[in-house]
Amino acid sequence: MSQQGAARDEEDGLDTRQRLRAIAIVHGTVQGVGFRYWTWKHAEKLGLVGCARNLDDGTVEVIAEGTRWAVRDLLKEIQGPDAPGAVMRVDAHFEDPQGDLSGFTTA
């Protein structure tokens, strides 16, 4: 995240260092294309903990916990043009961090 982006969030009243958990369901062609591995690598670079796992309906569930800015950046990345496969939609909701995760896995 750029310092300018962080400053803008701070001006909007968001504490970008606040920790939170995102649970996202990723729709599209996201299984069998390296999407979970790619997500894992990006999550680790951002210092996030959580997992990316295939669901029976062909979607991928991503659970990511860390700072607001890191979670936001991961969600942007998985919807970006460099993500493997074809992401059609990401449905995400946010929760308080639970602190029960360590590392990032591809279950």
Image: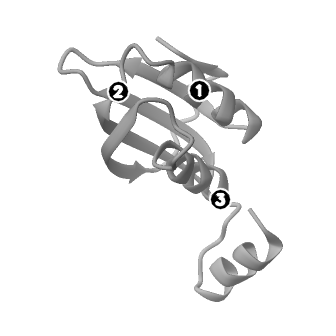
Tag 3: residue type?
Trp
Q: Name the residue rendered at 71%, 31% in the picture.
A: 44
Q: Nearer the viewer, mark 2 or mark 3?
A: 2
Q: Judging from the image, what secondary structure is the residue with disc 1 in?
A: helix
Q: Of residues 100 and 25, which is closer to you in this image? A: 25
Q: Name the residue rendered at 45%, 45% in the picture.
A: 22
Q: Earlier in the sequence, mark 1 or mark 3?
A: 1
Q: Is residue 26 above or below residue 69?
A: above
Seen as rendered, the residue at the extreme left is: 57
Q: Is residue 38 above or below residue 32?
A: below
Q: Earlier in the sequence, mark 1 or mark 2?
A: 1
Tag 1: residue type?
Trp
| Residue with the mark numbered 1 | 38
| Residue with the mark numbered 3 | 69
| Residue with the mark numbered 2 | 60
Seen as rendered, the residue at the extreme bottom is: 11
Q: Position of residue 87 (x, y in %)?
A: 36, 40
- Mark 2 and mark 3 in contact? Answer it, CB < 8 Å: no
**Left/right of residue 85 with respect to residue 71 in the rendered view:** left
Q: Name the residue rendered at 70%, 75% in the picture.
A: 5
